[in-house]
Every structure is written in C-alpha cells, then in structure tokens.
Image (cartoon, helix red, strand yellow):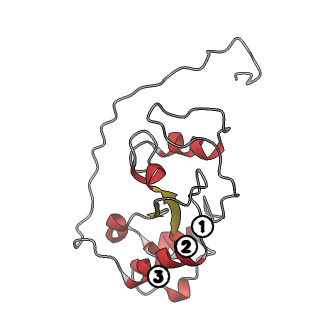
Amino acid sequence: MSDLTDTSATGEHEYKETLTVDVFYPEHVQRTESALFRETKHTLIDKDDKPCMVCGSRENREVHHWFVEWAYANSIDWKKMQAYFTDFDWSSFKEPSDFVDSEYNCRVLCMTHHRAKDAGIHMIPYPIWLEQLHKTRAFVFSPTGAPTGAPTTTPTGNYSPT
C-alpha cells in the first residue's frame, strides 16, 4: 500500500490514453423529450437553480441521466432497480421513463462536464470524470481548459444509492 504523504512519489504528469468503447444499445425508439424530462429540467435548472455539480457554474447547464441512460431503459431489470434504489418512489413507476426522466435519476452539469472532450461524463471513464468533483481549485484536470475547482456550493442529490 502506498503512502499518500510520500514526497518521493511521481510528480504531476499527463496521462494520455486512447479508449475504444464497443457496447450495444438495446432496441429503442428515436429519443424525444418526455413531458416528465421537460418538467425535471425546468425544476432543476429554472426553479431550483441548481448549478453544475462539478464546477458550480450556472452557464450552459444541461441535465444528465445519472443512474440509467435513456437508451438503456429497455434493457433494465426494474425489479433489481427497485431492490437497489429503495428511496425512489416506486409507487409512481408505471413505465421506464418514470424513473429515467425523474429528478431522482437526473443531475445538472454544465456543457463542459456533460459532453466536452477530456471533461465530459460522456467522454471519459466515470472514475476519472469523478475526480473533477473532488479536486482542489489549484489542480488543472485536463489540457482542454475545462473549468477548475470544486463547486462553490455543495452538490446535492444521490451520487450513489443509499
């Protein structure tokens, strides 16, 4: 086990990797914005004024499907989900979009932390992406100029099931 206080460790350096992803999406209809997703976006961005959960920005905010991506809704074992996400109101569940497009499953991200090269959750592996949430303001995460630093407000919501 390494000692994180060991000053002889490797200095700051760039890690560069080419990642190829080869996965299947289940059959699904072309994505359209559901009424529930419109309501969720309105609540999170307009009504609650939630900032990007990574950098705290209120510019170019988007809503990300957190636990279940919309395209995977038809491949989900919803009985497993009910056992795993016990704090979701399953009494309101009638079809997959009731969970997928709900506030419970959505998080606010700025465009950079949602879709940008070297910073977006759709562009880099989740464990690496997550480090942006915890880093110090002084640490530069990537060479693409993504906003630095932790959010100015504490992120709210479930990052993992409780």
The residue positioned 43% from the left and 87% from the top of the image is 94
Is residue 16 toward the left or the right of residue 91 in the image? left
Q: Along the polypeptide, which appears first: circle 2 or circle 1?
A: 2
Number of marks present in the image shown: 3
**Residue in the foreground of this view, choosing between 151 and 134:** 151
According to the picture, the residue beneath numbered tag 1 turns out to be 50
The residue positioned 44% from the left and 64% from the top of the image is 68
According to the picture, the residue beneath numbered tag 2 turns out to be 44
Q: Secondary structure at mark 2?
A: helix
Which quadrant does the N terminus fall into? top right
Please say if the residues under marks 2 and 1 sit with CB atoms less than 8 Å apart.
yes
Label 3, label 1: how many angstroms apart (C-alpha)? 14 Å
- Residue 28 % position (x, y): 24, 70
State the image quarter where residue 144 is shown. top left
Mark 2, residues whose alpha carbon is within 10 Å: few (<14), some, or many (≥20)?
some
Residue lying furthest top: 8
Is residue 102 toward the left or the right of residue 95 in the image? right
Q: Secondary structure at mark 3?
A: helix
The residue positioned 42% from the left and 77% from the top of the image is 37
